[in-house]
Image (tube, helix red, strand yellow):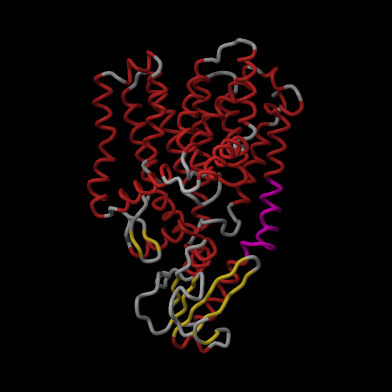
Amino acid sequence: MSFLRRYYWGILGGVLATYVFSLFHAYVGEEANYTIMSMEMWQRQIFRSVVALGGVGGRPPLYNWLMIPVARLVGWSQVLLAARLVTLGATLGTALTLGWWARSLWPGVGAGKLAGLLYLVTADVLFYRGWLAYADPLFAFFMVLSAYLLWSAVQRRNLFWLVLSLWVIFASYLTKVMTAYAYYGGIWLVLSSQRSGREFLWSRRALGIYVLGLLPMGLWLGVVGHQDTLQVTGQLDDVSNKLLSLDDLSAWFLKLGEFPLSILAGLLPSSLWALWGMTAQRRQGIPWPMPVKLLSGMALLNFLPYWVAPHSALRYVLPEYGLVVLVATYYLIHEPVLFRSGILSPERWVVGLALLGLGVSAVGYPLYQQRVRGDNYARMATQIEALAGPYPVYTLNWTSVGLSVVALIDSRHFGRPAIVTPPPRFADGLVIAETPRDLPGDGWAELEGQAEQLILICRGKVCAAPFFHSGRP
């Protein structure tokens, strides 16, 4: 630990450089979902609902609200950079929140600096989740901040912090989905397991605060939910389907075994130190400190629904990462003797991950995107623009490849109308599709780019290009 203290700022600088390099990668996964929404929302001046490919509704818009002013600052041609800057801000905000939380729990021992660094070098966050242009990092930031505020409200018996925690969890809902309130409820239940927590959280004054704190959610559902029912019904259907739709029993059993292992791997190295420290104390007959009990209880309670759900993903439990990081911080600070052996050495893990992250971000990702997939999206977008000429481009391709190409074309020509799904009867134009049978047309062709391919269906004068086959397949 002395090595980490001595070279803390240098290590942190290397970690932050990793994130900076990551900002400039080509599109990864379904990042284009969010950039397309933001571009169309600004073009159509619709802000209370998300807009994508001509359709309206289905998701809360806070991530897009933050992305739009950043995109206007850096330029709409760099909308992906704007989205990733918002994500990186959320990641750094989560690290800072964990630092404040750790410092309030264990003052005067450097816990705050360590907790923030541990979150930033968490494997899944460093290599993927911490910079990717998805709503999950911002969603997790508000949830972690809300949990910290609720914890602090109980410790200080402060009603203002309590209402603030409820307003922050509303911001989390506005980022993605109403399961933010389930997370908040899990934190609330664990804190209520202690007598001091119950005396505060169940008091008459606190009950009044809950009404005040839930008021923004009620107003939002009353006003926006009435105009955009998909923000309510769509979310409820999506959550219930993921929790209850058991399609394949064998796949579910496989997921029960695989999911916690994936979480433990994504949470390295903090998961290793937290489990080792808790196990070592249990073997020695030493009771876990109260903060460790509460934090691990919060993490476990909020993890269980995603574990038993037939359909869930690693990114859904991103808010629990910070709780495990805090437990790991406790053991590294207070039980350093447990981690002197080679495989458990904090110095080796943190420095190793920082160097590996820098290498992957600066060299690995660019090479992969150049040779496998990523850079080819820009070339495919250029080919489509050349083939379409002055005629409109539409899309029926909702794959990550199709969306990435659409986002690139839209961002290059932000002054023109955005690409949308094709109208019922159009005479001339080009449609980005998944198969030649997606839409009747006058011709079609397969556009290949490295490991990816798209189908282009043409109508009218666009079909004059020799690139297209005539008629249906």
Q: Nearer the viewer, residue 170 or 274?
A: 274
Q: Quadrant of the N terminus?
A: top right
Residue 19 at x, y percent in the picture: 60, 46
Judged from this view, the residue extending furthest toward the top is 285
Which residue corresponds to the image point at 44% horizontal and 28% vertical from the top-left?
148
User: Does the magenta segment cover residue 369?
Assistant: yes
Which residue corresponds to the image point at 31% horizontal and 53% vertical from the top-left?
230
Question: Which of the 4 image quarters holds residue 211?
Answer: top left
User: Does the magenta segment cover residue 48?
Assistant: no
Which residue corresponds to the image point at 53% horizontal and 60% vertical from the top-left?
400
Q: Which residues are magenta?
A: 358-375
Q: Nearer the viewer, residue 70 or 424?
A: 424
Which residue corresponds to the image point at 64% horizontal and 65% vertical from the top-left?
451
Using residue 340 as the reference point, say whether residue 283 is left or right of it.
left
Question: Which of the 4 image quarters holds residue 416?
Answer: bottom left
Judged from this view, the residue extending furthest toward the right is 342
Is 1 located above or below residue 134 in the figure? above
Q: Main SS type for the magenta part? A: helix
Question: Which of the 4 image quarters holds residue 314?
Answer: top right
Is 410 located above or below residue 134 in the figure? below
Q: Nearer the viewer, residue 302 or 73?
A: 302
Is 431 located above or below residue 331 in the figure? below
Is 147 located above or below residue 45 in the figure? above
